[in-house]
């Protein structure tokens, strides 16, 4: 009997040991399982937040991207804006991500998430502005290696009162995904950071610029190298001896007592609203035709009279000149771009220039675009009819000969003058003067 | 913030802090009230760019700020358009006598002479709210340009609420113009006179044919006739004269007596003469053609009447004239007993002007 009792006692002790060992084993194992279950809500990696404007208080678009750490279905998410990455979440002042319009991409499953601003029973309440909630009913397993994107358009950035009013201020978005639709069974989580920054303003002043000069030049093509305003010289164009057999067109060679020069008007201005170049004929002494090509002080008759010492002017409507038919005029033969440099593309022959000749002073045709931008053949003594059309207003009224709607970077008007006397145009030294003015509109 | 005002008591610090905080909104308000805007578009157009010339100026610009405007300041500088830079007055420029001749847009301005100087002009009015939707235009006269050629002049335009261009400014912007020398076009029309002589000549002297005439066999019952032509043109404002030089027809020592006064052709009478008209007795010649400025001279200007005075003027023009072609009619009559022989003469036509 005693043996039986001992056997029973030993058995009981063994049983106790087994139970104790089992309990101990359970005490060790259960936490491992529990902990293991907690650890299954792993960090989403990689993850990022891109914002399209960092200006405090600005309306922005947030693009939140992450790769799930597990294949568990995702049926809801919560994105929480906080001033810190860990610990109790304090909402950044002014931040409103719930007022944005979220969309999603990259999630497996065809059903899109719907924004939720009312639920309060989940891990976090969805009715606060610093939390963006979305849910859907879709149990599709997720792929861990692909990017899942939530784009929230219309977010209001945190304002400048955060970070003790420091202009540059970091904020965090904590991202939680759940396998259920009610924000309870967490799948993954991750935190991303970004920052609002102050707007950096660079101030500079560009002063109004104007360089306008008048001179003469031996250049007789639109591609010749001409002087800049700082080196320009000459104030006259000499057409030499006029005969009724020819039209004398600048430049007239010294052989014919000319000075082999064209007129030159060069303009540089940064006037954003453009500029114009005009001329007015200087009224010289004498009677009638005071602004024309005339002998200074001569008594001339009004109208077209050949026998006085005033050569008839073409007028404001351009026309060709015919040798022997008394006439005087001016034309823009071309636009010289040699001083424009790399400021912008300027090529006369291509019609790419800013200073456009006015119709009646455009040698070959209408204003820019209406002609071939071909430099005229008229030069020296032209027998018969000129190729180019000329105009000259002798009244003293201001006439615009070229204009621009934008800046002009050193474009030069090559001015041709042409005159022919009649057979009976009296002998004498004839001259005309013009005052050229540039008017920029800044 | 104690480091900002360490010498004040705690109460004073509190008071100053409250005061500063109270003033903050007003600072924002003031900053907004005096926000400076750039006048745009803006321009100045001058009537003359000649140095030292009297000129007019047309200013155009659009106001930006809605603040009351009581004055507009125009400051002329030759060194910089930047408002932060000191202004250097252009040499020779004088706006002190300027007159405001016209204005449109925001109007009611007059020149504030008390605040106007050689390079600064103030337009003044009772301050009132401007219309910022219009382009303002102000025309000024009696301005003297700077004396320096190729001088860029910047005009700084500033608006104020005050009527004398003092206090805080509202809008501003600079414009520019440049003085330039006139461009002169010169030409010389040389003296011109052309005469061509021949049996026949083109109206414009482009052709001339023949230099010899044959009047045939002369006798008491016949009148020898012949014609030649000349054309003449000149740009001599005083006109021209054509003279005939030479002698009557001669054969050795024998001559055909020239007509020394205008007379008709009489067969059997010793006569040598000429005129420049179309005749019917004898039927020769032609009237002048071309420019009517040239006309036959007295003695040679009546049909059927002839004359020959060597060295005399046979046609003239009182003004410059295009080509006039004259047809010279010659007659020769001989009496009975006129010695036989070959009678000839060489005549020279000479044109002259006075230039």
Image (tube, coloured by chain):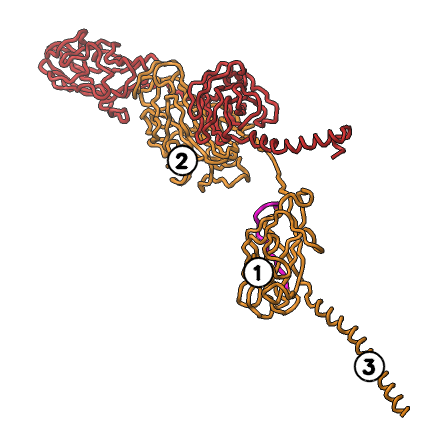
Single out the residue that lies furthest toward the front. A1
Tag 2 residue: A377
Seen in the picture, residue A47 relative to B274 is either above or below; the reply is: below
Q: CA distance from mark 2 to mark 3?
A: 120 Å
Q: Locate residue A61 relative to residue B333 in the image: left or right.
A: right
Q: Can residue B79 be seen by looking at this rendering?
A: yes
Which residue position is annotated with label 1? A134
User: Height in image: A408 above or below B241?
Assistant: below
Figure quadrant of residue B1: top right
Give the percent coordinates (x, y) of residue A50. 61, 54
Q: Nearer the viewer, mark 3 or mark 1?
A: 3
Is residue B183 visible in this depiction of the protein?
no
Q: Nearer the viewer, residue A116 or A390?
A: A116
Q: What element does badge 3 sit on?
A: helix
Instruction: Say which residue label 3 marks.
Output: A18
User: Mark 1 or mark 2, which is nearer to you?
Assistant: 1
Chain shown red: that is B
The magenta region covers A55-67
Q: Nearer the viewer, residue A164 or A3?
A: A3
Q: Chain of mark 1?
A: A
Q: Is residue A185 above or below residue B239?
A: below
Image-based side of B352 in relation to A170, left or right: left
Q: How crowded is the residue under tag 3: few (<14 C-alpha within 10 Å), some, or many (20+)?
A: few
The colour one sees for chain A in the rendered image is orange
Q: Is residue A61 magenta?
A: yes
Residue sitting at the far bottom:
A1
Q: Is residue A304 left or right of residue B227?
A: right
Chain that bears disc 3: A
Looking at the image, is mark 3 or mark 1 earlier in the sequence?
A: 3
């Amino acid at each position: 009997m005693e043996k039986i009792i001992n056997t029973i006692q030993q058995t009981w002790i063994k049983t106790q040991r087994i139970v104790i060992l089992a309990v101990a084993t359970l005490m060790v194992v259960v936490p491992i399982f529990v902990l293991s279950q907690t650890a299954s809500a792993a960090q989403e990696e990689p993850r990022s937040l891109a914002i399209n404007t960092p200006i405090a208080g600005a309306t922005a678009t947030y693009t939140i991207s992450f790769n799930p750490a597990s294949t568990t279905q995702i049926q809801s998410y919560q994105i929480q804006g906080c001033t810190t990455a860990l610990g109790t979440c304090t909402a950044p002042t002014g931040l409103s991500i719930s007022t944005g319009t979220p969309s999603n991409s990259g999630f497996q499953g065809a059903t899109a998430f719907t924004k939720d601003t009312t639920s309060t029973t989940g891990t976090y309440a969805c009715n606060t502005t610093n939390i963006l909630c979305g849910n859907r009913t879709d149990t599709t397993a997720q792929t861990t290696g692909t990017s899942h994107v939530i784009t929230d358009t219309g977010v209001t950035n945190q304002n400048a009162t955060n970070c003790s009013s420091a202009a540059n201020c970091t904020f965090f978005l904590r991202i939680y995904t759940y396998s259920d639709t009610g924000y309870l069974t967490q799948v993954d989580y991750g935190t991303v950071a970004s920052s609002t920054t102050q707007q950096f303003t660079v101030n500079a002043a560009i002063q109004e610029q104007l360089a306008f000069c008048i001179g003469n030049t031996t250049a007789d093509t639109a591609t010749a190298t001409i002087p800049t305003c700082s080196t320009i010289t000459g104030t006259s164009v000499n057409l030499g001896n006029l005969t009724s057999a020819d039209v004398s067109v600048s430049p007239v060679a010294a052989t014919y007592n000319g000075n082999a020069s064209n007129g030159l008007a060069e303009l540089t201005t940064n006037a954003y609203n453009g500029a114009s170049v005009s001329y007015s004929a200087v009224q010289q002494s004498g009677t009638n035709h005071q602004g024309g090509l005339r002998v200074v002080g001569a008594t001339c008759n009004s109208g077209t009279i050949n026998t006085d010492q005033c050569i008839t002017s073409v007028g404001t409507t351009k026309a060709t000149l015919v040798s022997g038919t008394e006439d005087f005029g001016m034309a823009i033969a071309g636009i010289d771009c040699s001083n424009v440099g790399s400021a912008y593309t300027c090529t006369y022959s291509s019609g790419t220039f800013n200073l456009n000749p006015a119709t009646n002073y455009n040698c070959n045709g209408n204003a820019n675009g209406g002609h071939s931008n071909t430099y005229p053949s008229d030069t020296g003594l032209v027998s018969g009819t000129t190729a180019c059309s000329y105009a000259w207003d002798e009244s003293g009224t201001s006439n615009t000969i070229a204009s621009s709607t934008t800046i002009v970077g050193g474009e030069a008007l090559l001015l041709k003058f042409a005159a022919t006397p009649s057979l009976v145009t009296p002998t004498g030294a004839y001259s005309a003067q013009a005052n050229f003015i540039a008017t920029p509109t800044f | 913030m104690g480091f900002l005002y360490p010498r004040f008591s705690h109460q004073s610090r509190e008071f100053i802090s409250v005061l500063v905080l109270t003033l903050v909104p007003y600072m924002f308000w003031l900053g907004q009230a005096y926000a400076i805007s750039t006048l745009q578009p803006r321009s100045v157009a001058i009537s003359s760019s000649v140095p030292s010339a009297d000129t007019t100026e047309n200013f155009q610009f659009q106001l930006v700020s809605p603040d009351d405007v009581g004055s507009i300041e125009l400051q002329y500088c030759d060194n910089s358009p930047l408002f932060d830079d000191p202004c250097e007055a252009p040499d020779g420029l004088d706006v002190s006598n300027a007159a405001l001749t016209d204005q449109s847009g925001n109007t009611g301005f007059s020149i504030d002479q008390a605040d106007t100087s050689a390079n600064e002009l103030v337009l003044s009015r009772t301050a009132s709210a401007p219309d910022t939707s219009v382009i303002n235009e102000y025309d000024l006269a009696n301005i003297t340009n700077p004396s320096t050629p190729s001088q860029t002049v910047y005009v700084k335009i500033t608006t104020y609420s005050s009527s004398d261009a003092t206090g805080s400014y509202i809008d501003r912007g600079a414009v520019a113009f440049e003085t330039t020398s006139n461009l002169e076009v010169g030409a010389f029309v040389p003296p011109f006179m052309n005469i061509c002589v021949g049996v026949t000549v083109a109206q414009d002297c482009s052709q001339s044919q023949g230099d010899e005439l044959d009047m045939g066999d002369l006798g008491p019952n016949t009148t020898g006739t012949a014609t030649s032509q000349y054309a003449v043109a000149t740009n001599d404002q005083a006109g021209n004269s054509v003279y005939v030089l030479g002698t009557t027809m001669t054969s050795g020592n024998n001559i055909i007596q020239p007509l020394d006064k205008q007379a008709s052709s009489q067969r059997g009478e010793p006569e040598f003469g000429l005129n420049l008209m179309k005749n019917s007795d004898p039927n020769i010649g032609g009237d002048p053609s071309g420019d009517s400025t040239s006309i036959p001279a007295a003695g040679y200007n009546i049909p059927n009447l002839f004359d020959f005075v060597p060295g005399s003027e046979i046609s003239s023009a009182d003004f410059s004239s295009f080509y006039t072609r004259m047809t010279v009619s010659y007659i020769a009559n001989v009496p009975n007993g006129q010695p036989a022989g070959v009678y000839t003469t060489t005549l020279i036509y000479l044109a002259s002007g006075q230039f």
